[in-house]
Image: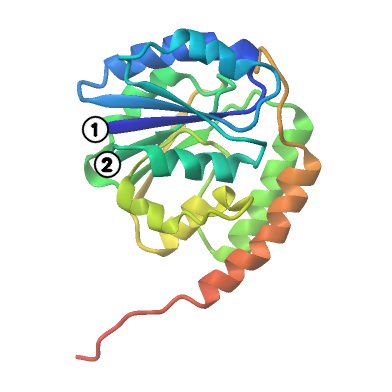
Amino acid sequence: MISIICPFYNERENLKELYERLGKAAGELGEEWEILFVDDGSVDGGGEILKSLVGPQAPVRLIELERNNGLTAALHTGFKAARGEILVTLDSDLQNPPEEIPRLRRLMEHADIIAGVRKRRHDPWLKRTSSRIANRIRRAVTGDHIEDTGCTLRIFRREALRAFHPDRGMHRFFLPLAEAQGFKIKQVPVSHEERRHGKSKYGLKNRLLGSLLDLRKVRWMLSRRIKEGVRR
């Protein structure tokens, strides 16, 4: 089974379209699937919209968190509830088209993780600039080869969750930590569209400054890794 996990926070205007497009894309996978929407404490009524769409027999579930805890917590909740051995993550802002999922799934034969890379980002200048700065600093500190840690469109095998740390903000470092643990990551260009509805939940403070603070923890974690080896 493949589990598609979509966290959302105050994305009311996007949810009906996301529900319809995601269901169609999942139907093209050619395997058993489920969709988990994780409401990260929305206050705009988005959860009620999904409740009106999800039928009792549909392979779609809605999980509602009591309050807004951030993307890492929402993803962690979805991972715990998912039944599939293959996991997909996707933002609910529709900037990454759900239609990309079947294509990425077909690329998994020789990889543990398929990671989307937004080559032509339709984001404000400040958001793109802060991401570039954060990426350069992260790579300089960790030595990883990840091009885009901010794209949540990913497909990966459940065992890769060993690299996911459920601490606030640590979702940003899932791929660098997975690479350090030896998981094979294939980075694939994906489409990126302009946000038509709602507002981004990330700004300079939580995207750049927050990630730089978390980077200290990641550097410490990497320095403490056990390097296995047997003398021959």
Regarding mark 2 in the picture, which secondary structure is present there? loop
Disc 1 residue type (three-letter): Met
Asked whether disc 1 touches disc 2, contact meaning CB atoms under 8 Å apart, the reply is yes
Q: Circle 1 sits on which residue?
A: 1
Which quarter shows the C terminus?
A: bottom left
Mark 1 to mark 2 CA distance (whole Å): 6 Å
Which quarter shows the N terminus?
A: top left
* Residue 179 image-quadrant placement: bottom left
Whole-percent x, y for residue 92 in the image: 55, 23
Whole-percent x, y for residue 3 in the image: 34, 32
Residue 115 seen from this side: no
Taking 160 as reference, is 198 left or right? right
Regarding mark 1 in the picture, which secondary structure is present there? loop
Viewer-proximal residue, 191 or 79?
A: 79
Residue at position x 54%, y 76% from top? 223
Give the number of the disc on residue 85. 2
Give the number of the disc on residue 134. none
